[in-house]
Image (cartoon, rainbow, N blue to C red):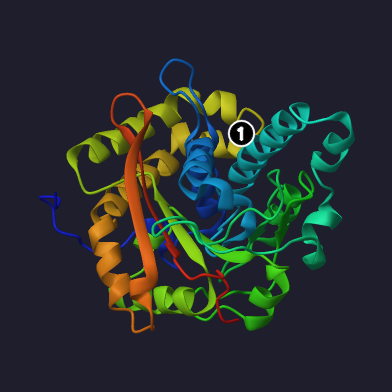
Amino acid sequence: MAPLIPRLHLFEIADQPWFPPFLRAYIQTGLTHAWTTCVPILQPCSPATLAANILRRELDDSVSAYTYIDFCAGAGGPTPEIERALNRQLSSTSTSTSTSTTSGSSKNNNKPSYAEVADPDSSTTTSTNGKTTPPIQPQTQTQETVKFILTDLHPHVESWEKAAKNSANLTYVSDPVDAAAAPKDLLTSTRNGKGVFRLFNLAFHHFDDKLARAILRDTVETSDGFAIFELQSRNISSFFSCMAFGMFIFLIAPLLYWWSPQILFFVYVVPIVPFVLVFDGLISSLRTRTADEVEVLLRTCGAKDTGDWVVRSGSENFLWPCGYLNWVLCFKQSSTGQAKA
């Protein structure tokens, strides 16, 4: 069902060049906490963990056959937490599988080292097993951990470096990366026998139709799949969720930012942070596309063979009663899963 509210590509305050960079950093920190915070009773898990669950469920056995590249990582956003949550699940699956085998084979089913995951000679690719099943199948009997890469047109190297130190499976590109013209060397060097899967976390609504088509065309021509995750949509419940988020910041800020009197000043004394979070959240809701609208852009982006791409979508509650994670996941049905790079 199409939303009653038409899509409006209005401006967001934090995107404007005149908005002070230090305040923009506070806004990005607030959005990161929106992704990674889990409130007991009200939330079964954080939105970032929910996004990892969706990738695991929808890609099924082929989830470990991709390298995941966040092309609009900002200051890091949810991707470090998605990486941790997804690899915890894969590690748990491997452990569970290994305990059900003989002691001799269990040694081969343990979680591989970072070097083993990166080794292109340690994996193979098999064909698809169904029309709407992700094309790249698992390369071993157990689930390998997967690599995530942070990129952006405006790199946040300092923030990414801190995040990357906490995981051997998370890296970053320090040079600017344009999602509409991804560097061939980046795509080639990150394949290592795997497919390339792009992530757009709370980002795709920022692109107008022209830029969105250009990004999708580059994705179809050089990658094997992509996922769009948004914390908002064009409906009334999303507007209530944005307002509630502003109140949530007022309530929880002392716990999150006790170490920074400056942030607390711009939350309580001069409440720029909550105002911008709510205002931009409402505008983001008006900008967000439905799955059908994303599919129209995909089919008309100008790339060849877009008909070979499968589109899946859904909306899942992450905060009772009105917080929903909206997602669109696409992958191609080729027999090899290898795109041109």
| Label 1 environment density (alpha carbons within 10 Å; few <14, some 14–19, many ≥20) | few
- The amino acid type found where label 1 is placed reads Pro
- List x then y, in percent, for residue 107: 87, 37
Q: Is residue 289 visible?
A: no
Depth check: give the residue in front, 227 or 46. 227
- List x then y, in percent, for residue 119: 82, 63
Q: Is residue 294 left or right of residue 25?
A: left
Residue at image mark 1 = 261
Q: Secondary structure at mark 1?
A: helix
- List x then y, in percent, for residue 59: 50, 50
Write the residue at 77% across / 32% down.
Answer: 98
Reply above or below: 260 against 17.
Answer: above
Q: Is residue 212 left or right of residue 189?
A: left
Write the residue at 40% across / 39% down.
Answer: 274
Q: Is residue 191 visible?
A: yes
Tag count: 1
Q: In the rendered image, which quarter contains the C terminus?
A: bottom right
Depth check: give the residue in front, 261 or 70. 70
